[in-house]
Amino acid sequence: MKNPHTENQTPFLLRLYLWSLILLHIMGGVMTLLFIFPFQKKNLKRWHIQRWSKRLLGIFKVELVVHGSQILPNRSYLLAANHISWLDIHVINVFNPIRFVAKSEVEGWPIFGWMAKQLGTVFIKRDNSRHARQVSGELGKILQSESICIFPEGTSSLGTHVLPFKANLFESAVSAGAPVYPLAIQYFSTKTGLRSEAPAFIGEMGLIESIANILKERDLRVELSFLEPLKCQNGLTADRKQLAQYSQEMISRSIKCYM
């Protein structure tokens, strides 16, 4: 009897071909950052980022569906998202290129760490409250003119639930007077309609292993759900703990709707 899971996997030769496309795509990104980015204005840089990310999703055969984007303001804002995969960043960039905060380990990744740095990623040391305060101050200044996305769980998960949100980085929105929009990220199989764990980048998994997992289970749909910000009554301003708790609860509620 055939294993249905094996039947749904991408054929081996096709995966080899896709690996070659990924390598060429990465090389193209490096060339763009080296020889084009330094001479481009902000809008053209954003166009290059969006195009590169869109092509990456095409290689992985990931379909993007966006809900609730009409609630986003014309001013800068803070996005607080649950975190499942390194792919999350590129999914968001397909929708709208934005600055990100990433764990400091990412900066040391070969090629990808350098690329992230060139794109203005702010790196933070995990479980270091002093460094988190320093980064929060930096983010507060950036939020005066640019939007930022943070992953307050501090790590990635399978996507079946939301880990507790750390409140430190929400202080940047308080100091900048910027609104905070929760963002729920979910991955599904387009073949079965069920939640997919293939993109999950968890535990001691390496980047190469994660890419291989995604290539095995192509035909994915990723859904971005932008949720209403916290509205305080009587003109009061929310503090960082309230913003963190509210964002976590809103995303958890959104994810449960698809369970």
Image (cartoon, rainbow, N blue to C red):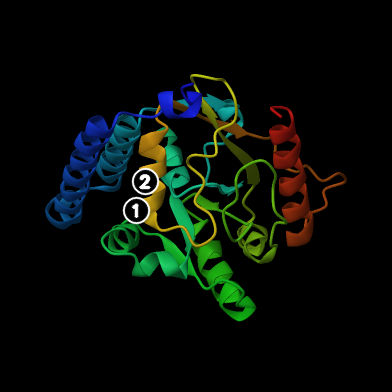
What percent of the width, then of the height, locates residue 132? 59, 72
124, above or below 61, in the image: below
What percent of the width, then of the height, locates residue 184? 62, 38
What percent of the width, then of the height, locates residue 68? 60, 27
Residue drawn at x 11%, y 54% as measured from the top left: 35
Find numbered disc 1 in the image and state the secondary structure of the residue it sits on.
helix
What percent of the width, then of the height, locates residue 4? 49, 23
Crowding near the residue tagged with mark 1, few <14, some 14–19, many ≥20 C-alpha atoms within 10 Å: few
Cβ atoms at labels 2 and 1 below 8 Å apart: yes
Residue 158 in view here: yes
Crowding near the residue tagged with mark 2, few <14, some 14–19, many ≥20 C-alpha atoms within 10 Å: some
Q: Residue under circle 1?
A: 208
The residue lying furthest to the bottom in this view is 130
Who is closer to the viewer here, 129 or 110? 110
Find numbered disc 2 in the image and state the secondary structure of the residue it sits on.
helix
Say left or right for 123 vs 17: right
Q: Amino acid at mark 1?
A: Ile
Q: Residue under circle 2?
A: 211
Who is closer to the viewer here, 229 or 111? 111
Who is closer to the viewer here, 115 or 44? 115
Q: Amino acid at mark 2?
A: Ile
